[in-house]
Each structure stands twice: as C-alpha cells, then as structure tokens.
Amino acid sequence: MKTRSIFVDTWGWVAYGHRRDQYHAAVVKVFQDLRSSNIPVHTSDYVLDEVITLLFKREVFAEAKIFLEGIFAAAELGQVQIHRITSDHFAEAWRLRKQFQDKPLVSFTDLTSMVIMRKYNIQDVLTQDDHFLQVNLGFFKIP
C-alpha cells in the first residue's frame, strides 16, 4: 500500500469495529498495513459522531465502548489525528454543498471530510463510499 496518509471515513471505522461486518477482515488487514508502514491516520469528529451512533446500534455496549476508547487512546498517543470541524471547515463544506448541487446524496459529513482531506493533502480514504470519487477532487478509495 503506497500512501502518505489516509483519511478513515465512517465506513472504515464501522467495518473495523464491528466484527460481524462483511468487510471486517479486509479492513483489519488495511489497519495492520497502515500501522506497520507508519502511515498517518486521519479522521474527524463528525465522522466519529456517525461511528459512535452506528456501532452502539450494531455491537453490544461493552464492545462498542472498548473499540471507541481504543480510537481515543490512539489519538492521545498520536497514532490517529482527529480533526475538529471548525466554523471555517463548516463554511467550506457548505460551499462544496452548493457547488455539488447535482450530487444531493453526498452527505454533509462527507463534505466536511473532503475539506479536511484537501487541507492536509490527503488523497486516500478508507471507505466504500463512491461519493469521494464522484466529486472529482482527486480522491482514491482504499481498499
């Protein structure tokens, strides 16, 4: 896997944290490769908002709690960069929302992720969401 850094979308975290997800094994492998290659991992508080909601619906409470606390601990250790969506990021995402009026299915959270990815020159995103490709901003889906 050749990449300078990667943004983990909601799908990536949920597949990683939900052991019964059909993509769990593949995503575990991606995270192992990222760790062994020391590739920086980025995400956002908006993404984690979605992850928290979905994992607590799909996983038993204790498992979801342990998984999410693992993400927070990794962030404290500098292994995961959690970007906070600021008012400037929000405004830029709103600009993108208006720009991509022909793509109403692109979520606002995805738009905020795209803002972060552009700001930090991150091209790779761990997702199955084709919206990152449909906007033609130079993003690549992993796996």
Image (tube, helix red, strand yellow):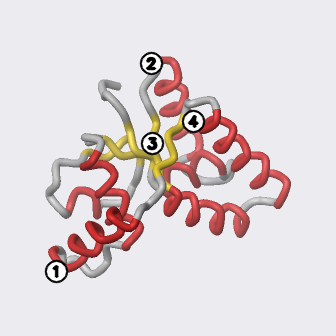
Dividing the picture into quadrants, the one containing residue 70 is top right
SS for tag 2?
loop
For disc 3, the neighbor class at 10 Å (few under 14, some 14 to 19, many from 20) is many
Task: Report if the CB atoms under discs 2 and 1 are less than 8 Å apart.
Answer: no
Residue type, label 4: Val
Q: Are marks 3 and 2 in contact (CB under 8 Å)?
A: no
- The spot of residue 26 in percent (x, y) is 51, 38
Earlier-in-chain disc, 1 versus 4:
4
Local SS, label 4: helix
Q: Which residue is mark 4?
A: 28
Classed neighbour count for the residue bearing mark 4: other residues with Cα under 10 Å, few (<14), some (14–19), many (≥20): some
Q: Earlier in the sequence, mark 2 or mark 1?
A: 2
Q: Horizontal and vertical percent for residue 30?
A: 48, 33
Classify residue 53 by image quadrant: bottom right
Label located before the other in sequence (3 or 1): 3
Q: CA distance from mark 2 to mark 1?
A: 38 Å
Q: Which residue is the site of mark 2?
A: 37
In terms of secondary structure, where does tag 3 sit?
A: strand
Choose mark 1 or mark 4, whichever is in front: 1
Q: Nearer the viewer, mark 3 or mark 1?
A: 3
The answer to which of 75 and 13 lies nearer the viewer is 75
Residue type of the residue flagged with mark 1 = Asp
Which corner quadrant holds the C terminus? top left
Mark toward the start of the polypeptide (2 vs 4):
4
The Cα–Cα distance between marks 3 and 1, rounded to whole angstroms, is 28 Å
Discs 3, 1 touching: Cβ within 8 Å: no
Residue that extends furthest to the right in the rendered view of this protein: 62
State if disc 4 and disc 1 touch (CB < 8 Å): no
In the displayed structure, would residue 111 be above or below residue 81?
below
Provide the residue designation for mark 1: 102
